[in-house]
Each structure stands twice: as C-alpha cells, then as structure tokens.
Image: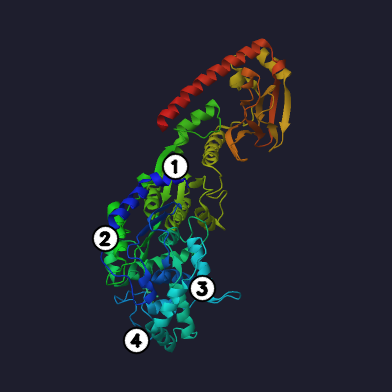
Amino acid sequence: MDKKAVQLCPVQRYLEQLHSELAGMTGGEVASYIPELTRADPAWLGIAMVTVDGHVYQAGDSRQTFTIQSISKAITYGLALEDRGIDAVLAKVGVEPSGEAFNSISLEPDTGRPLNPMINAGAIATTGLIEPAPDSTPMTRIMETFARYTGRPLDVEERVYRSESDTGHRNRAIAHLLYGHGILDRPPEEIVDLYFRQCSILVTARDLAVMGACLANNGVNPITGVVALQSRYVEKVLSVMSTCGMYDYSGGWVFHVGMPAKSGVGGGIMAVLPGQFGLGVFSPPLDEKGNSVRGLEVCKRLSRDFGLHLFHVARSTSASVIRQTYDCAQCTSRRRRSAAELVLLAAQGGRIRVYELQGELLFGSAESVALEMLSGLSDYDYLVVDMKRVVATDNASNLVFAELGRRLAAEGKQLFFGDTRQLYRFRKELQKEQEGRQHPFGWLHFEDTDHAVEWCEDQLIAAAQTAAGVDRSLTDLKDQYLCSGMTPEELDALHAGGSERRFAAGTLIFRAGELAESLYFILSGEVEVWIDSGSGHHMRVTTLGPGMVFGEVALLNQNRRTANVSAATDAVCLEIRFDALQDALRTRMLVNMASYFARKIDQDTRLIQRLG
Ligand code: GLU
C-alpha cells in the first residue's frame, strides 16, 4: 500500500483528530484485580483500523503491547467451533447473554452449562474444548491460531500470566465446578492454566484491528491472505460478540455503537463492521463494567460520525445492478452479418434480450432483477445475462438465479449467463443445478456474452432460412460486397485468377504480424477473426461466414496482418493474391470498401450515442 496515500487519506486524518481530542479525556480506573495490570500507563491511547482491502490506519499508541485478556475468548470460541462443530460446542456452552459480571458463576442449574462463551465460565469451558494435535499441545494450537489472525507470531506476557495464576482463585473455582458438571473432561487445573495463558497473550491495537478485519472479511486475513477462521463459523463468533461481547453493557453497546465487539480488562476493544473493517482500540482505564472508557468513546464517535451501525441498511435494488438492457434489434453481436441477415435481425432481434448486470448481487437486488426478467417473459425467447461487471454474488442471489433458470426452462425460454469466470460460487451453484438435466447447452455454456448472443442470432437466422429454403453456402462472387458493380466478365476473371483453399476447423489461416499478400472470399464454412488481448487470452473480434471476405483491408496499405484468422468450422475460401489483381478490379474494390466503411462509421456513431 502507498504510505503517502494512507497519510493523506481522510480516514487517517479523522483517526488522528479523534486521538488528539480524546487523549486528554479522564475517567475510569486501570484494572487492579490482577496485580500486574496496574503497571499500565493510564495515558496510553492507541487506535487502529484495518479494512477488508488490507489498508491499515493507525493513530497514537497503536503499537504499544498489552495483554489481550477477554478478547481472546472470541478467538478461542472460533477455534473450538472448528475443532468440534456447532452442536458439540453448543452442548457445552450456550449463547444467551447473562447480563451479569464477567466473572459471575452463572451456570444453567440442571446441566451446569455456562450461559455463553464470553463470560469467564463459558470461556474456560470453550478453552477446554480445544483439542491437542498429535504433534502440538492445545496452547501451541491457540498461539498458532492467534498468529493467523494477527499475521505475526505472538508472545505470552509471563509476569501477567503468573500474577493471574497466583490470584485467580475464582476462575479456579469455576473450572472445578465445570469439571464437576462434566462440562470439562480434562483436569480443571490444566484448563484454567491454559485459559490464564491465553488471556496473557501480548497484542497491540493494530493487532486487534487486523484480527477484527479477518472477521469482517469472512475469516480471511486481508493482509496475509491466510484463513484465520473457516467462513462458516465467522457469523457464529460475531453473533456472540454482538450479544455478549461487552460484559453487561452489551445491550447498550449494540444500541449506541452497533458493531460486534469484544473488550478485555487490559483496556483493549476489538470491533468489527462485517464486510468493511476491523477496529482495535487500546486505553487502560476501565469503567465500572470493565470496558475501556476512552475505547468506548472512540467506537461511539466513529459509529455516529460515519453512520456505521450494523443495522444501518444500504439499499440494494434492481436499479443499482441492471447496467442496461437491450435486444438484438437494437444491437447485434460482433459477428459480421450479410445485409439480408441484418434485415432479419432488425425485424426479429427483439426475441433476444440482453441484461447487463453490475456490482454486487445480494438477495434483494437478485430478487428484483429476477422479477423484472420474468415480467417481460412473452416478449423474448432468448435471455442472455452479461455478468462481466458483477463483482460478487451471495448465497441468496445464487439460489434466486438457479430458481430463475428453472422457471425460464419450464417456460421454454433459453437462458445463458456470459462472462462468469470471476464468480466461482455462482458457477458452482448453477453447475450443480444443471447436473443430470437434458440441455443442449447449459446456462454457463458460453464463455462470453457476445458468443451467447451470436448463437441466439444464429438460431433466429437458421429458422428463417430453413423456412425460406436458403442454401448456406455461397459460391457466387456477385453477392460479395467487395464485388458489387463488377460485370459478369470481371467476376469470371476474378474467380479464374484465384485459388480455392480448404481449411479444416481450427486451422490458423494467418497470424497477426505476417506480411499480407492476399484476400479471401468465404465460399462455405466460418472463420473467426481474433486477437491476443494479453497473457494469451483469445479475444474474438468477429466471426465471418459465406458471402463475406477477410484480409481485404490490407489492399489499402499492403501491410502486415493486424489480427489472427482461424477456421471456426471446416471452410472453403477463394484466395486472391494482390499482385494478381487487375487495376480496374482493384479500383472497384477500393471504392466498395470506402462505401462500406462510411456506412460502418455511421452505424458505430449511432451505437455510441445509444450507449452514452
Ligand atoms: N483473565 C481475565 C479473567 O478471567 C480476563 C478478564 C477480562 O478481560 O474480562 O479474569
């Protein structure tokens, strides 16, 4: 990331200003029930924010280390879910807020199950669920997990650990109670020791922000790209943070700040705005509920000033995701067509409808797009959805589109999605849906939208030609635009001077950069004009068929080929060498080309106007 850009960014300026405004704020007491914690400087104030794009903003003492304390509970809870699965964890620890102090001994009367994993009883039970691995202890696994979240190896502050271990009688008592109820199945001393160590891991406000950003980013560390938590458990961890993360201020916190968060008696707060960023704040003085006084203020201000409350809902509607919609009477594929075919498409192209979607497809927007597509059902036979500009789809929108596909198939409509390469989950969902179904081509059959549209056009044209009994091969040069105005004698001379060439499907006829020495009239079959759009990506310029010509532009400059041409099907062409061309014929061709280009410029101008 560009350091200068970060310094200039309004977010950085805002955090610095917030820091200087709150630096002088007093109130609260540094925690003293663990004697070592009293060594913290009450003046420390660190603020850090890390976005899901991995941008880091920080102000004040954001690199000062302190012990993570209760914030560790959220991370260990995620690890327990990964180790044991949701049901096994729920059997040992509930998810109901207690409304009581963090160290209360509140267990369900019958089962002895702690109410939630964010109070000490629940956290000790959770730590007891972490499995040893064949080659590592539970503590090693906990340290490795935390390091995946922070992106750096962490240490335990031995003095704080000793201090808590020497004085933590209440937590020991809780562990013994849990053991008595069968919630712990290993010796309570061992588990409570693990818990004390986990609470004494040293972190910074910046670390907390990165950890929060992992949770905001579906479990993936946005800086290292490493998976910190399997995505299916992210929402579970965030849920308990929302309802139980801020001691017995959790209700007030959701009301005033509205971000899942967890605080610790070391003075840290880790907050998460899902999909956007993680926030880490550190300031040791605590209020009577155990939350950092200035930490709370930072979060409240940020939420208020930017309107960041989780329940602040952005609208997502069809208007925001439908970029444009058109049919093939208005705009055809890049395939070059004969004049007769263009007339046909102008008349019947309305049967092919194209929707260009953009942005992020979520439940709400997918639903209204699907509704719009279904409401015009009688107007079209082919629906092509261009996904090129769609950056992401969620689970809900994948299901909505799979259902849309089923509905359209039942109505006898042909549906294709083009340019879906970047949408892995969307593709997977739709492929699953299509398995075992008898489709000539699946919804994802065409790589890009243009080929899908071309195929639909071919269907319309073929149907019309079959109805009219037209032969698709065209050996007569008089129908070539390049030959228009030539006498029958001239046409014969042209034919006699050329040589017939047969190309099997897939053959490269010429390559970009080669010297151009001839032009080719297509008598039967099809050829594709294409370029390499960088890194070997094959991009189609156009496809040509019988009655069309290629390579003729070189007649203007006799230069090098500007594109590649391959046979798309078995094809027969008449090759005319430029040096064998009589002057009169050459002039005739140049004039025809000029009038063709004049028409094309006119057409393109109209297209540009429409797109504008
Ligand atoms: N290790 C601390 C305890 O259990 C954590 C307290 C906290 O941060 O809430 O007492």
Which quadrant: the C terminus?
top left
Q: Residues within 10 Å of mark 2 (few under 14, many from 20)?
A: few
Q: Quadrant of residue 120?
A: bottom left
Instruction: Name which residue lies at 65% across and 37% down.
Output: 568
- First of labels 3, 4 by sequence position: 3
Instruction: Name which residue lies at 50% across and 51% down.
Output: 423
Left or right of 368 on screen, residue 2: right
- First of labels 3, 1 by sequence position: 3
- First of labels 2, 4 by sequence position: 2
Q: Tell me the element at label 2.
A: loop
Q: Is mark 2 within 8 Å of ligand 1?
A: no
- First of labels 1, 2 by sequence position: 2
Mark seen at residue 47: none
Q: Quadrant of residue 212?
A: bottom left
Q: Which sits in the foreground, 38 or 378?
A: 38
Q: Position of residue 1 (x, y in %)?
A: 48, 47
Q: Which residue is mark 4?
A: 109
Left or right of 236 on screen, residue 580: right
Mark seen at residue 83: 3
Q: Position of residue 13 (x, y in %)?
A: 34, 48
Q: Which sits in the foreground, 369 or 514?
A: 514
Q: Which residue is mark 2?
A: 25
Q: Which residue is mark 1?
A: 356
Q: Tell me the element at label 4.
A: loop
Q: Position of residue 349 (x, y in %)?
A: 47, 35
- Distance between the Cα atoms at labels 3 and 1? 43 Å
Rendered view: 555 above or below 201: above
Rendered view: 45 above or below 486: below
